[in-house]
Image (tube, rainbow, N blue to C red):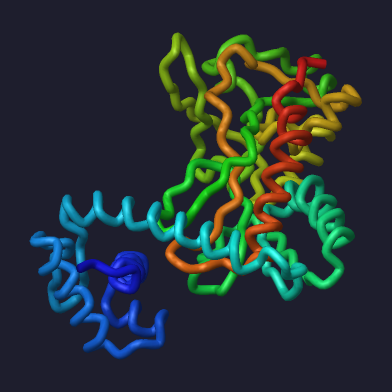
Amino acid sequence: MVDLLSLQTFVRIADGGSLSAAARATGRSLPAISRSLVQLEADLGVRLLHRTTRRIHLTDAGVQYLERCRRILAEVDDANASVSNLDRSLAGPITLTAPILFGQLHIAPVVTEFLGLHPEVSVSLMLSDALSNIVEEGIDLAVRIGRLQDSGLVARKLGEVRRVVCAAPAYLKRRGTPKTPKDLANHSCLQFGALSPTPYWEFHEAGKPRQVRVQGNFSSNQGAPVIEAARAGLGIVFLLSYQVQELVAKGELRVVLQAYEAPPIPVSVILPSGRLQPARVRALADFLQASIGAKNLAKLRTIKTA
């Protein structure tokens, strides 16, 4: 009979990419991990993993089973947390990471409000535009902007943000306003590497995605320098809507090519799967989802051309 420990072990193996990684993560011996996997496959009557001397690969059955295991373990976590923490106040540390500007504008205020309600909780907020491996680095929660690739994570959607093209009115007066994406070939395009690491910007034309090559004389891996360059009239920039919302409202930047915008991208709060999360971590995830999803992101999608 398959038990929860076997499911947890299988998820750990899949997330870690090896039996030894699962052994380190769980504090169990490598033979115990191997026996658990062998017994699980025997109970199911299917092969879940292809194993070689160097790495493992999920079989088709393993891919399907992994997704179901994640859901089962998440439901168990929900049930355990709902019962074990009914009469306990929230207390203890939480480590949270978020993109720099989004964290400053939208995460920090929510965290402050949360701590006001739960003074026994402490939060370490790490702001960085680099993606952290939250499992390996021991991070409890992460806010991410974009489509998620990590199969070993549980994601809660907070909302969506637009990808917008904008420039200073003075620049557009001097160089002209682009009417279609191909017009960008005649403009100085400022590159924000975290959003578009290659010299191609994504648009949608006639309902189909289109990549347009751009060029310019300034780029940065941080948003603030590129935004400042755009404000100074150095060129056109491709950014996320929340990054320029206030500047557009003030008339310092103007959004162009709105008819060709690609679909908005999700903002999510993520946490590791396959393990019981402390009540304080789950509570902060719930609070972020309720606060940001209901208030901030609805506004981020309503930028209008100045």
User: Which residue appears at 43% of the width and 64% of the height?
Assistant: 274
Eyeballing the image, is 243 above or below 301? below
For the image shown, how many numbered marks are present on the structure? Answer: 0
Q: Can you tell which quarter of the image residue 176 is in? A: top right
User: Which residue appears at 56% of the width and 66% of the height?
Assistant: 277
Q: Position of residue 55 (x, y in %)?
A: 21, 71
Eyeballing the image, is 131 above or below 13? above
- In this orientation, which residue lies closer to the viewer: 237 or 268? 268
Q: Position of residue 192 (x, y in %)?
A: 63, 43
- In this orientation, which residue lies closer to the viewer: 111 or 174? 111
> In the drawing, does residue 162 fall left or right of residue 297?
left
Quadrant where the C terminus is found in the figure = top right
- In this orientation, which residue lies closer to the viewer: 182 or 159? 159
Q: Position of residue 170 (x, y in %)?
A: 84, 21
Q: Can you tell which quarter of the image residue 295 is in? A: top right
- In this orientation, which residue lies closer to the viewer: 291 or 202? 291
